[in-house]
Amino acid sequence: MTGPNGLGDLMQDPDETIRRMDDWAAGFAVKAQKYQAAQEQTERLRLTASSPDGAVSVTVGADGTVTDLTFSNKVKSFPLEELSRQILTTMRRAQAGIADRVAGVMAEQLGDEDRETRTLLLDNLRGRFSDPDEPDDQPAPGEPGPVPPSPAGGAAVPPAAPPASAPRRRPTAPEDEDNNPW
């Protein structure tokens, strides 16, 4: 690579080479500072949701973990199943806002840098913390899908479930017990 602006040009002017390398390193340092600031701000994020009746309030961090859970006196009369349902639903509502809040932090701290990385991260968060109020497109595992119509106008028969098979495990040799894949 000895053409214009190639390695040959850099070798002819060592001072220019050093300047370009310093600029390159400084660019990485600035980028690292931006990512550090985004990480710190993201770690401080807290999202709170309350149940519609105000009986349950849940606060979560950017990683989805519950950081606070409060109840009003209303929960004293709730059956345990109802209380459990409200806690989980309210937690999921709080978690559903994580991707949008992290996107805001990334836009503020990083601007337009690393769109691919941002897209991967945010898609991952949206997949992990989907909005519980939006209907799912697919049936939950274990729920049967729609039954196809019978070909001759008779009663429809649900499709047979594939046979369940146990996962195959390889025998464990004593040297594999240290959890080292190599």
Image (cartoon, rainbow, N blue to C red):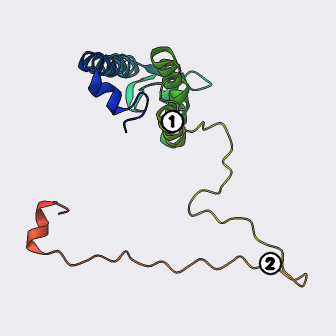
Report whether 49 appears left or right of 11: right
Q: Which of 5 and 137 is in front in this view?
A: 5
How many numbered marks does the figure carry?
Answer: 2
> What residue is at 53 percent from the left and 43 percent from the top?
127
Amino acid type at image mark 2 = Ala
Crowding around mark 1 (Cα neighbors within 10 Å: few <14, some 14 to 19, many 20+) is few
> What residue is at 91 percent from the left and 81 percent from the top?
153
Question: Helix, strand or loop at disc 1?
Answer: helix
Q: Which residue is identified by label 1? A: 116
How much space separates mark 1 and mark 2, taking CA atoms? 47 Å
- Is residue 55 in sight in this rendering? no
Q: Where is residue 165 in the image (x, y as percent from the top left)?
A: 44, 79
Q: Which residue is identified by label 2? A: 156
Report whether 78 appears left or right of 26: right
> What residue is at 59 percent from the left and 56 percent from the top?
140
Q: Which of marks 1 and 2 is nearer the N terminus?
A: 1
> What residue is at 57 percent from the left and 39 percent from the top?
130
Residue 83 in the image: above or below residue 102: below
